[in-house]
Amino acid sequence: MIIAVIKLTISQLFPTLIPKTMTSLQSRSLSLKVTSIMLLLVIFASCEKNEEDQLLKDQLVGTWKSTNSYYKSYTFNEDNTFIDTAYYLYSDNPFDFKVLAIISGDYMVENGQLNFSNIHLVYFEGQNNEYTQEYSTTYDPFYIVSSDEDILVLTQKDVFESVNKTNSGIIGKWTHDKLVAAYNKNLENKFTGGILHGVYDFKPDLSVNWQYETSYDNIVNNGNSTTTYDLTNSKLSINQWGLYDLNVSFTKNKMIWIYGDRTFQRKQ
């Protein structure tokens, strides 16, 4: 009886309290259900993407040799390490070649993209020359990758970040990093690797200036280069840098360059 009186008194004093409380609880319950469903969808999508990446990695493992004039081979190991060997062909005979450089490092397949990291130089032509003190070469870290049992297609992808976040098109300053494989005769570990940090300044007069800093094993080198460029219908060419007809796109303060495909055939 006392409980009934208390309930009646509360409902009389606050006629909207109970309905509002129930509505609030129902709303919270619905919100939790929606959140749980969204979380499950995200987890499911992530698991599905991980499975796709793992499948692509499984297809990638092995040794591949290039099928075009740019003669190169990749060996991708199960433990996420790789070896990249570049050759020079003396003739049309594929057995008439000289090894130019060998680079090794780590790789990862993520969201359908092949990412290289922690690279270092293993060998380069001329390393035993007594006059060779220092040598380095840049290395691109990102590739769009597709593969089947016998053919591997790699498409280089360069991603640039806007410096001032206000770029309208290509005009302005952009940053872009590459990997570096290096040799220095004066270091305890002569063969090493590092980073090349570059700032590209594209100007309205169709000139571009590249300021860069190479760093490895506490050694820092700076330099710059200036040339001209042409951007027509999303096709970019940069004279004197050997870059022609790159596909260029812009999104969220980023500039993306897509290069031509390189195809490789699985080595039996």
Image (cartoon, rainbow, N blue to C red):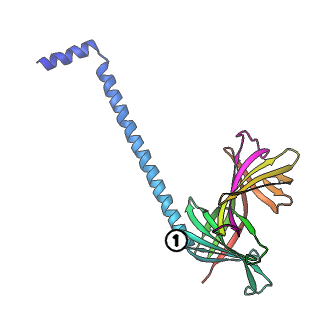
Q: Name the kind of residue labelled 1 in the image.
A: Asp
- The span picked out in magenta is 159-188
| Dot 1 crowding, Cα within 10 Å, few <14, some 14–19, many 20+ | some
The residue located at (67%, 67%) in the rendering is: 187
153 vs 202, left or right, is left
The residue furthest right is 205
The residue located at (56%, 63%) in the rendering is: 109
- In the rendered image, the quadrant that contains the C terminus is bottom right
Whether the magenta-drawn stretch holds residue 186 is answered as yes
Picture coordinates of residue 120, whole percent (x, y): 64, 67
- In the rendered image, the quadrant that contains the N terminus is top left
The residue located at (84%, 45%) in the rendering is: 203
19 vs 169, left or right, is left
Residue indicated by mark 1: 58
Picture coordinates of residue 98, whole percent (x, y): 74, 82
Placement of 109 over or under 90, stated as above or below:
above
207 vs 110, left or right, is right
Whether the magenta-drawn stretch holds residue 42 is answered as no
Q: Nearer the viewer, residue 212 or 188?
A: 188
Picture coordinates of residue 73, whole percent (x, y): 66, 76
Location of residue 95 (image quadrant): bottom right
